Image (spheres, rainbow, N blue to C red):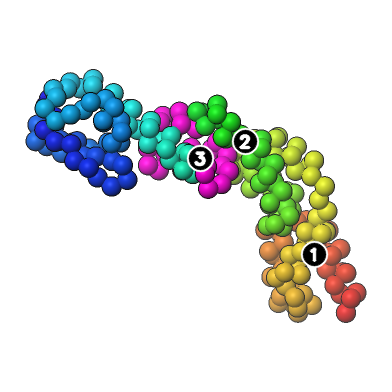
Amino acid sequence: MLITAVEPRRKAMCALYIDGEYVMNLDARTVIENRFDVGREIDDEELHEIIRLSNERRAKEKALWLISYRDHSKKELTDKIKRTCDEESAEKAVERMEELGLVNDENFARRYAEQLLFSKHNAPRGAVRQLVQKGIDRELAEEIIEEIDFDPCDGIRAVIDRKYKNINDEKIRRRAVAALQRLGYGWDDIKTVLREYTEED
């Protein structure tokens, strides 16, 4: 097989042509470093190897780009990279990020748990559910949530004060209760806090 053209493409990619036919887009740096120049004869093994190297580099670059914006759990990062790369390359890239200390599920879970409880006003049960969805082990999620000093009644008050000002209006009250239950709050805590608002009136 003869490389007949290598044409630049967007996002640091280039199009590889073999025997006059377009084959695929590859990472440009990988192509340059492996001297895949026009006029070079290659075999199937070399082609598969350059595809693997290209995929691995793209997966690592995607991983670095994603974690430069915010923390990710291993599962979340792997799932996002898999949208543009193969599963094996995605998993390798995330393992490398973990080795470098750029991805750490426990650290991620601690930071995200605080955010879920104090900014997003989830109940502890709801926060555990959200952490598990992000790929955090349930036992670790429960342990982390348990360590945080959080009063569910404070969380309920925060939601009501922010979103449900006229809580004594029956329709608004029902909406508030449904929203609080979706956030993982139990009826006993909700009832306790609602009683406070009734007493205020």
Q: CA distance from mark 3 to mark 1?
A: 34 Å
Quarter of the view holding residue 136: top right
Query: Percent from the top left, x then y, of residue 187?
Result: 79, 59
In the orientation shown, which residue stands out farthest toward the right?
199
Residue at label 3?
77
The residue under label 2 is which amino acid type?
Asp
The residue under label 3 is which amino acid type?
Leu
The local crowd at label 3, few if under 14, some if 14 to 19, many if 20 or more residues have their Cα within 10 Å, is many
**Along the line of sight, the residue nearer the viewer: 96 or 23:** 96
User: First in sequence: mark 3 or mark 1?
Assistant: 3
Please, what is the dominant secondary structure of the magenta stretch?
Answer: helix
The residue under label 1 is which amino acid type?
Arg
**Along the line of sight, the residue nearer the viewer: 102 or 33:** 33
Query: Percent from the top left, x then y, of residue 47?
Result: 23, 25
User: Which secondary structure, mark 3?
Assistant: helix
The residue positioned 45% from the left and 28% from the top of the image is 92
Does the segment drawn in magenta span residue 85?
Answer: yes
Left or right, 92 with respect to 131, comes to left
Q: Is residue 186 above or below residue 23?
A: below
Does the segment drawn in magenta span residue 69?
Answer: yes
**If the image is split into quadrants, where does the N terminus sit?**
top left
User: First in sequence: mark 3 or mark 2?
Assistant: 3
Mark sitting on residue 157: 1
Q: Are marks 3 and 2 in contact (CB under 8 Å)?
A: no
Q: Which residues are magenta?
A: 67-94
The residue positioned 85% from the left and 72% from the top of the image is 197
The residue positioned 37% from the left and 42% from the top of the image is 84
Left or right, 172 with respect to 150, comes to left
User: First in sequence: mark 1 or mark 2?
Assistant: 2
Left or right, 32 with respect to 59, comes to left
Query: Percent from the top left, x then y, of residue 99?
Result: 55, 26
**Along the line of sight, the residue nearer the viewer: 113 or 7:** 7
